[in-house]
Image (cartoon, grey):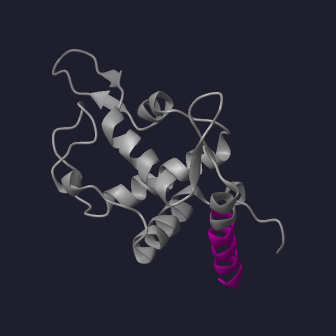
């Protein structure tokens, strides 16, 4: 089973597995305000899942793994959604830049991401190795079933 990467496994199952890994290791620095904040202006409430920060970090790491260099603005577009404007048509609204910036900074501190010379962030070799290792274990588990 050599050569299994993040691109070869299901995105949803990978993000769940990597978020569990980040929570289990305890290296990811979680801000104090995660239980109070909304993830975008289009939301009415904060996330119900208490581990949403780990899931967002896993999602960001996977997104940057697949696309070479990504900045905060691109992540805001990806994690954005539609705003309910009543009887008027809905429109796309970007997610919170502060949340995505803090996620990027947290992933940088543990060595998964680094700043790119051209702007944005890119994945480090250590980060790529971690993500590929988790993808490999997911592929092995799916083969056993």
Image quadrant holding the C terminus, namely: bottom right
Tally of marks? 0
Where residue 76 sits, quadrant-wise, is: top left
Magenta-colored segment: predominant secondary structure = helix
| Residue 19 x %, y % | 45, 65
Residue at position x 18%, y 56% in the image: 35
Considering depth in this image, is 135 or 57 the residue closer to the camera? 57
| Residue 101 x %, y % | 39, 40
Q: Is residue 58 inside the magenta stretch? A: no
Image quadrant holding the N terminus, namely: bottom right
| Residue 91 x %, y % | 32, 20
Give the magenta part as a residue range.
Answer: 131-145
Residue extending farthest to the right is 2
| Residue 73 x %, y % | 46, 28
For residue 68, above or below residue 50:
above
Residue 96 visible to the viewer: no
Residue at position x 36%, y 61% in the image: 29
Q: Is 32 on the left or on the right of 82, as rendered?
A: left
Residue 63 visible to the viewer: yes
Residue at position x 36%, y 28% in the image: 94
Q: Is 52 on the left or on the right of 67, as rendered?
A: left
Where residue 142 sits, quadrant-wise, is: bottom right
Residue extending farthest to the top is 88
Q: Is residue 144 inside the magenta stretch? A: yes
Considering depth in this image, is 82 or 76 the residue closer to the camera? 76
For residue 74, above or below residue 59:
above
Q: Is 35 on the left or on the right of 58, as rendered?
A: left
């Amino acid at each position: 089973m050599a050569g299994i990467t993040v691109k070869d496994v299901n995105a949803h199952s990978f993000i769940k597995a990597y978020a569990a890994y980040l929570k289990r290791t305890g290296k990811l620095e979680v801000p104090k305000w995660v239980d109070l904040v909304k993830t975008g202006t289009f939301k009415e409430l904060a996330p119900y899942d208490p581990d949403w920060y780990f899931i967002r970090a896993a999602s960001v790491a996977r997104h940057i793994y697949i696309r070479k260099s990504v900045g905060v603005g691109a992540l805001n577009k990806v994690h954005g959604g539609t705003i309910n404007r009543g009887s008027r048509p809905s429109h796309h609204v970007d997610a919170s830049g502060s949340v995505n910036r803090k996620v990027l900074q947290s992933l940088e501190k543990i060595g998964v991401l680094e700043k790119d010379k051209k702007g944005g962030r890119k994945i480090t070799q250590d980060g790529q190795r971690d993500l590929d290792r988790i993808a490999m274990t997911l592929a092995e588990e799916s083969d056993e079933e």
